């Protein structure tokens, strides 16, 4: 099994990943490609970089090409691949794939590589622009929802639906890593947190195979889960440090406040209100506000609770360093009695795997 190495100097800039078991061909291709874009040329047994490449060139036997493609998750994350096939084409699938016989003259291989780099650059720019629009749009929707709730004005279910579509489209297009990176550019804690939880819910829900309507419901619930915080004083919400007991009690009222607010509207589904009211319950019955335990806590609530805690631990805060994905998961697993252990087991690989090629 090939290891994914740590992010290198290539982490934040586009690069071509070339894996070849022919040292002289590898060196020649690397020199030529480096004229247009950084090129990381590796032997097949080397550790692979963690950052998402712009283009992958595989010059190895078919079984190796397939193993590398799977390790990189390349077809799933739609990274373009150019394969120099030995004999039969390698059994790879997915879009953005070109295969040429390994005997193809180097000039033709390079012409193909350059064309693919250009195409990938164009689509990366389009994708980045679109992601920016989606995050701006979703932030505006969440901020409107919180403002309306704070003012006692009506919340529009249609706005929540638009936000849900934006989160689902963006996360399925660019992955949770790029979504969070874009969301975190905004310096507004509660909206960032909301969009982070929604992004994790979209990823987790689709990975565990929820159908479209359940997935929509899950993301809608995530967008609204902390709506009760709209009624908590900003000084408490943004306090840079631990809350005193009185502030803490007030903060703990946000699930109830949110649920009452949505119930009063009359047009939000009971399952969504259930999430808003119960996302701080614990499996062992020591949560709040209703001290529900075990199966009294619905599946949707359990999923959102996991996404909520994971988001909170990994978010950047002014007063502490964020936990890494593995650190956050270790904390969550250790906090026995809090979260659903089976769902947590299903969640772990989803979140640990999401950073590999999601940038
Ligand atoms: Fe909350
Ligand atoms: Fe939350």
Image: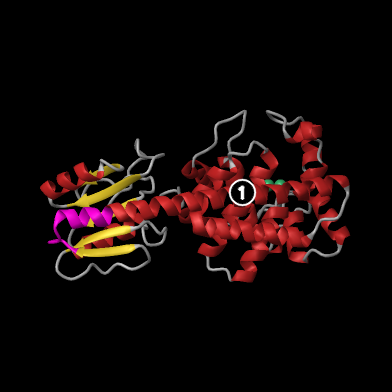
Residue 61 among magenta residues: no
Residue 271 in the image, given as x and y percentages of width and height: 74, 65
Residue 155 in the image, given as x and y percentages of width and height: 81, 56
Q: Is residue 67 above or below residue 194?
A: below
Q: Residue at x 86, y 60 (%)?
A: 265
Instruction: Answer with the quarter of the image where residue 238 lies.
Output: top right
Instruction: Answer with the quarter of the image where residue 185 lies.
Output: top right
Task: Specify the color scheme.
Answer: secondary structure
Q: Which range is magenta?
A: 101-113
What residue does disc 1 label? Answer: 135
Q: Is residue 249 left or right of residue 312?
A: right
Q: Residue at x 73, y 31 (%)?
A: 243
Asked whether the viewer can see residue 179, the reply is yes
How many neighbours does mark 1 have within 10 angstroms: few (below 14), some (14-19), or many (20 or more)?
many
Front position in the image: 48 or 340: 48
Residue 133 in the image, given as x and y percentages of width and height: 60, 50
Q: Residue at x 67, y 38 (%)?
A: 189
């Amino acid at each position: 099994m090939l290891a994914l190495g740590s992010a290198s100097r290539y982490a934040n800039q586009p690069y071509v990943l070339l894996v070849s078991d022919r040292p002289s061909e590898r060196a020649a291709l690397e020199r030529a490609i480096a004229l247009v874009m950084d090129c990381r040329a590796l032997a097949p047994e080397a550790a692979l970089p963690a950052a998402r490449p712009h283009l992958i060139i595989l010059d190895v036997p078919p079984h190796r090409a397939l193993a590398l493609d799977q390790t990189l998750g390349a077809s799933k994350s739609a990274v373009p691949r150019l394969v120099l096939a030995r004999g039969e084409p390698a059994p790879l699938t997915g879009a953005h794939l070109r295969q040429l016989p390994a005997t193809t003259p180097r000039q033709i291989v390079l012409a193909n590589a350059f064309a693919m780099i250009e195409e990938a650059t164009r689509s990366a720019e389009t994708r980045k622009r679109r992601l920016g629009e989606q995050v701006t749009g979703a932030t505006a929707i969440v901020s409107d929802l919180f403002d309306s709730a704070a003012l006692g004005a009506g919340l529009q279910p249609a706005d929540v639906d638009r936000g849900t579509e934006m989160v689902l489209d963006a996360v399925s297009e660019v992955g949770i890593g790029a979504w969070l990176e874009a969301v975190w550019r905004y310096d507004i804690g509660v909206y960032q947190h909301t969009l982070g939880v929604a992004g994790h819910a979209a990823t987790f829900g689709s990975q565990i195979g929820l159908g479209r309507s359940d997935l929509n419901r899950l993301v809608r619930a995530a967008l609204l889960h902390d709506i009760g915080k709209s009624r908590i004083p900003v000084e408490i919400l943004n306090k840079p440090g631990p809350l005193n007991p009185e502030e803490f009690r007030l903060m703990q009222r946000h699930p109830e406040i949110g649920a009452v607010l949505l119930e009063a509207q009359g047009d939000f589904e009971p399952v969504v209100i259930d999430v808003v009211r119960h996302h701080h319950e614990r499996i062992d019955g020591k949560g709040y506000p209703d001290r529900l335990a075990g199966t009294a806590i619905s599946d949707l609530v359990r999923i959102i609770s996991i996404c909520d805690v994971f988001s909170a631990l990994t978010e950047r805060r002014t007063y502490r360093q964020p936990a890494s994905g593995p650190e956050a998961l270790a904390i969550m697993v250790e906090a026995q009695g809090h979260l659903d252990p089976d769902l947590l087991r299903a969640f772990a690989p989803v979140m640990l795997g999401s950073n590999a090629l999601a940038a």
